[in-house]
Each structure stands twice: as C-alpha cells, then as structure tokens.
Amino acid sequence: MVLAAQVPVHSLLIFGLGTIAEPLQFSSVEIAVLLVAVAASAGLFFWRFGPILRTVYYSKKDADFSLNPVGRRVWDFFWEVLCQAKVIEQRPAPGIAHAFVFWGFLAFALVSLNHFAVGVRLGFLPPASFAGAFYFLFAAAWAALVAVSIAGLFVRRFFVRPVWLGKKVSYESGFISFLIFLLMVTYLGTFFVADGSVTVKALWWTHTLALLIFLPLIPHTKHLHLVLSPLTVFLKRDGFSKIPPLQGDEDFGLVAGKDVTQLIALQAYSCVECGRCTEHCPASNTGKVLNPKEIVLGMRSYLNEFGAASETPLLNEARGVELNGSPDNPVANFFSMEAAFECTTCGACEFQCPVGIQHLPIIVGLRRGATNTGAWEDTYGTKLFLALEKNGNALGLSAMERDKFVQKQGFPIFDGTQEYCLWLGCMGGYDPKGREIIADFAKVMTYLGTSFGVMKKEKCTGDPARRLGNDLVFQTLAEAGLMAFATAKVQKIVAICPHCVRTIATDWREYGIAPEIEHHSEFMERYKERLPKQGGGESIVYHDPCYLGRYQDVYEEPRAIVALAGELVEAPRSHERSFCCGAGGGLAFLGEENGSRVSHVRAKELADTGAQTVGTACPFCNTMFRDALSAVSATPPQLLDIAQLTARALPLAAPVLSE
C-alpha cells in the first residue's frame, strides 16, 4: 500500500496492527508557544475554579461529618466512580456511553502526559517500543469508543432532547462535546500518517489546542463534575437521606447562605445536570413546581451570586436568569417555598444521582429553615403540628380512641415479659384501615406463637414533623418515645409502618438509641415456612413503599409473603425504581394543590397491570390508594396489606387475651 510505504519502520505493522506517528522535532519557538499556551490554559482554569473552591472551603463546616467508615467510602468510590456502576445500571444506554467516555479519559491520561512531554522533547513512551506500541493501540481502541459515545450523547442531548435534560440547549455543552470528539479524531488520525510529516504536525497541534481550550471551560459548565464528583461520591454523608443535626441554638436549618455547609456546596457544584432525579421525581412527573435538579442548580446559582456567608434568604428570592440560570435550566420559580414543600421525600432523586448528590438533606434543610423560623405559613401544616403537640398523633384524635381499639382487640399491654412490643403508630392506632392491618398482623403473630404486647401509651414517632422541618416538635416526640421504651424495658419492636421503622431506628439516634425495630414484612418472611401457602392463583401486584425499599433496602421480604398468597405481579416501576404513593414527607396531611395527584398516577399504573389485588406494606400507601384506585378504575382491584393477605389464610384461632 502507498501509505505503508511512506511510514518509517517503527510506524509499520506491529503484530498486524499499526502504531502512532509523532512529529520528529519541535523548534525553540514552538516549544515556547506550547509552554505559554499551557500556562495560559492552566491559569484560566484556576482563575475560574478558584472562586468555587473558596466558596466550598469557606462554607459552614459539617459538624457531624466523619470519614468513618473509610471502607464503605472506598467501595463507593470504586463502584460508583471507577466502575460507573450507578451510571450504567440506572440508565443503561446513555450510561454505557458515558462510562466509555470516562474510561477513555482514564486511558488517555498517560497518552496526554506523553503528548505534552513530546512537545518539549521529553517524550517517555516511544512508539517504536513494545510498551509504547501496545499502549497507543490500547488507547486507540478507547478513542474509537469515546468518539462514537460522545457523538451519540450529542445526538441525544441536541436532537432527541429528553425533557428532563432541560428546556434550553446549552451550546457550550455542544462545543465541549465537539472538542472531545476532535481530541479522539486527531489522535486516531496519527495512525494513518507518517512521522515528521506536515499532517502529523497539524494533527498534533490541533489535538493540543483542543485540550488547552477544553481545560478552562470546565469550571463554569456541567463538566465541572469531572473534577468534583469523585470527591463528592467519596465524601457524601453515610446513610441514605441522612438529615444532619442542627448545630446549637442559632441553627434553624437552611435559612441563608451562611447556613449552607461544605458538603451541600460541594454537591451543588458537582451536578452534571443529567436530569435523572427529575425523571424519577413524583412531583416533577405530576405537574408540580418542584424539580430536584433545579433545587441543586438553584443552590449553585445562589452561591455564585451571594456567596457562602450571605444573609440573603435562600427561598423566594427573585434572581435574574442571566446571572443564575444554567444554560440548560434557566432559573424560574423552582427555588421557592412552594417547591420545597412539594417533596414527598421518596428518595428517588438521591438514589438515582450518579455523582453523589444527596437531595433530601438539602430539601429538608430548606424546610427546616422555613418552618423553624416561622417563614412557612400553611393551614394544614399548622393543624398537623398542633395535633402532634396536643394529641400525640398526626390524625389529631384523642388517645382514648386508641385505648378503645386496644381494649376491643384484647391486645395485652407490654410489661417487659413479652418478646416483642407491637408498635401501632398513628395509622395502626387511629386510622380504620390501619387498625384492620394491625389486627390481622396480631393474628399472624398469635398463630406463630410469638408473645407480644402494645404500649399502654403511644405518641407519634415524629416522622411528619421531621420531614416538614419542625425540629422542636420532632425532638419532643423522639425524647418522649425513647423514655417510654426505656421505662417499659422494651428490647424488640415490630411495626407495620416503614416510616415509623426508619424514624425510630435512624432519626431518633440524634437523641438516643432506641430498641431494635423491624418491619412486619421482615418478621413474617423469617417465619414464611410456618405460614400457610394459599392456592387459587390470585394475581397480586406488589407496590414497593419508598420508606421500606430505598430507605431500608427491603425488597424481597414482602415479595416472599405475597408469593405465599398468590401469583406475584411486578409493576412497570418496581423495586428501587418504584413510584411514590404521594404520602411521604408529611404530604399525607397537607394535600396536593397543583397538577395530577401522585397517588392517582401510581394507582392507575398498578391497576393497569390487570392484577386482581394490590398488595401494600405500608399503611400510608394503603390509605393513599384507597380512594385513588376507585378514581382511576371502574373495576378497581382489591387493596390489602401483606399482613391481611397472610391472615386470611390462617385457621380460626383463639383471640388474644387482654390483661
């Protein structure tokens, strides 16, 4: 071939494959120009990146932050950053394309270092050597994958344009995609030209300029995640949706810039604007103002404009689009009181984020700032807080109503001799449907021969107050609950409500350690071999509660119980991708003002599976679907908790004896 005849010996075929060509020499003028260009590019990068670093560094310290457990952090870094596992798993097609680009950049690190070293006559990876020939060909394979992947991502962003990527197209993002594509093409081109030719010199300089132009663009674009996201993933708070404690009497939550912590600032600047959080957010999917991506971008915009020490309120500030909006997501009314209180705290946003952003501590922090300072004024919210303070339950009913239910069912009072304390919760103690679930679960426990008792007096765990940001009410309820358990000498608790389980096991830790607690699905699964298996082939679609699934990683236990009762059917969105019922975050007591009802959207999805029964494992989900199923279907499926599914097959047993 003509090309092969022109290529020197060390650029000929090695093991049947070609290798890279390089400029044979650089003049002193070229070296000087290169050094000045490198210095200018690096200088512009740090000039633009410096203010961001200072903002993060001078933000408020996270008082509860600890590097422990280091092992978990190292694993998260390996799995989520190096392996790109979450990127691929949760959005496979664009995820693998993004992963190829990331892995390609890693493969190119050595190539790029050698590239600049060649420019100052210090190249350390000779193409004629075995190591050089092998590595350059290895990088060429990645260059081809990166070129194809970045082209695909460009088409997706600028032509397919999924709505969650943003309303406006970022031309700067497109230019960066072009630079990445150009880097790959100019590298691959050097395999088809001769050493020392004018063409290879042109390719070399084009590649160099693309790199040097790319670097200063990083700090003020979404590509800043290339620098920050590995650190964000490594440093993120331990535990899913962990709400940090307040620091002293003057800390009311996220009121102004001075309250923004280092982790929040770091996460705000790490957002890649991929829209995965928006894609899975129940509020965004039902026409609400809230968009979790724009909450994070709003935080970034605020910090860019006002800084970390600002006294300017975070919520309800009118800010100019040209100063604060990212090109993809112009600032609108999303960084507002309304948006902050539309969150169901389902955790879909936080679970989906590929760069370690923890949305819920930010959103709950904004709620805390508004609620604890009295800035949030809501009739339903005020009524809820008063009910919790006065009656000790979210439904605002007299404690006598619970006492009557306990006496009617003949539940024994926990006296320290029983194995389990059966926690009723607000729904199990006061809601009619919740009472049915508790009664049936008590039958299951009796059938299994497990001794249990209920607390003589019970107050709400404080879950709705916690999620709505009322720390005073939550603290009062948590401390009362801890004292009640200690007085009664409770060792083990079982509850039908995953919200109660999460709050007692995790959120109460701010004030003390509660006894061991588990969800009734975990309890029943442990004894599944002793529970009756029902025939008939009834189809049951199971709905994953957010606070049982994403919050506690309990997915298979309730399914095992459903499988005993009939044929398990999976909803289109299930497991970690389950769609919220709309009750979380205190919204069961606030109601929905805008858009479609979250419960109706999910109920229709469940009904459309054609299953005869909808199985739930949370009394809040149950109460949300109660009316929703009738509203979306002329022949709605039956609605039963997993305890009810199990109890209906039990033989008649003697009632539980009261004390």
Image (cartoon, helix red, strand yellow):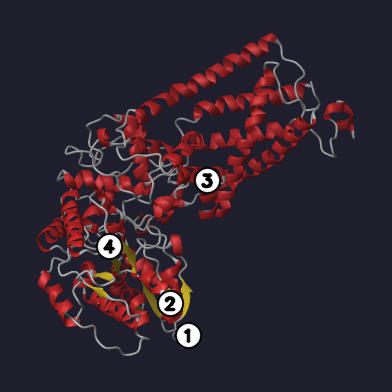
Q: CA distance from mark 1 to mark 2?
A: 18 Å
For marks 3 and 2 on the same chain, the one whose residue lies earlier in the sequence? 3
| Residue 550 image offset from top left, x and y in percent | 40, 58
Q: Amino acid at mark 2?
A: Lys
- The residue beneath circle 1 is 537
Q: CA distance from mark 4 to mark 3?
A: 42 Å
The N terminus - image quarter: top right
Q: Residue furthest top?
A: 28
Closer to us: mark 3 or mark 2? 2
Q: Residue furthest bottom?
A: 652
The C terminus - image quarter: bottom left
Closer to us: mark 1 or mark 3? 1
| Residue 57 image offset from top left, x and y in percent | 36, 28
Question: Residue 528 has which mark?
Answer: 2
Q: CA distance from mark 4 to mark 1?
A: 33 Å
Q: Amino acid at mark 3?
A: Arg
Which type of secondary structure does the marked residue at label 2 adopt? helix
Res. 333 image quadrant? top left
For marks 2 and 4 on the same chain, the one whose residue lies earlier in the sequence? 4
| Residue 337 image offset from top left, x and y in percent | 24, 47
For marks 1 and 2 on the same chain, the one whose residue lies earlier in the sequence? 2
For marks 4 and 1 on the same chain, the one whose residue lies earlier in the sequence? 4
Q: CA distance from mark 3 to mark 2?
A: 49 Å
How packed mark 1 is, by other alpha carbons closer than 10 Å (few <14, some 14-19, many 20 or more), is: few
Lateral position of residue 464 relative to residue 356, left or right: left
- The residue beneath circle 3 is 157
Question: Residue 500 has which mark?
Answer: 4
Q: CA distance from mark 1 to mark 3?
A: 46 Å
